[in-house]
């Protein structure tokens, strides 16, 4: 046989062989089961994607809370520094001694 040619068994070319798979007992039931299993697989994948999406939302919310707390701490530190500098400048202007 030359290259590029496919060997064909002549028994597979007889009349009606194209429908032989569908005529086997239980073939349709197995096909329906396969369709249902594929549907369940899709449902499982969608559930996993939903859980991943919810996890991303929770992470974003916690990150937003962390940013809010960090900005409050930063603001509090700036206010403390400003008050410290003001009291230091007022004492220096009044001629008082710096206790620090």
Image: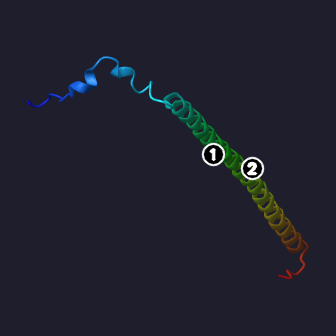
Per the model, the C-alpha gap separating discs 1 and 2 is 20 Å
Nearer to us in this view, 77 or 12: 12
Q: Residues within 10 Å of mark 1 (few under 14, many from 20)?
A: few
Q: Is residue 72 above or below residue 14?
A: below
Mark 2 closeness class: few <14, some 14–19, many ≥20 residues within 10 Å? few
Which residue is located at x 63 percent, y 38 percent?
Answer: 43
Tell which circle, 1 or 2, labels the residue nearer the N-terminal end: 1
Residue 74: % across, % down: 76, 61
Q: Residue at x 83, y 66 (%)?
A: 80
SS of the residue under disc 2 = helix
Residue 37's tag is none
SS of the residue under disc 1: helix
**What x and y, as percent, mark residue 5?**
15, 28
Q: What residue does disc 2 label? A: 61
The residue depicted at 75 percent of the width and 50 percent of the height is: 61
The residue singled out by tag 1 in the image is 48
> Quadrant of the image for the C terminus?
bottom right
From the viewer's perspective, tell me whether residue 82 is left or right of residue 67. right
Q: Within the image, what quadrant is residue 36 found in? A: top right
């Amino acid at each position: 046989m030359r290259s590029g040619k496919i060997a064909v068994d002549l028994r597979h070319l007889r009349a009606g062989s194209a429908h032989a798979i569908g005529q086997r007992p239980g073939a349709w039931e197995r096909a329906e089961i396969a369709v249902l299993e594929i549907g369940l697989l899709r449902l499982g994948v969608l559930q996993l994607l939903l859980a991943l999406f919810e996890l991303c939302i929770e992470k974003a919310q916690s990150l937003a809370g962390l940013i809010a707390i960090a900005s409050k701490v930063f603001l509090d530190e700036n206010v403390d520094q400003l008050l410290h500098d003001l009291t230091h400048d007022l004492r220096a202007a009044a001629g008082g001694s710096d206790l620090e």
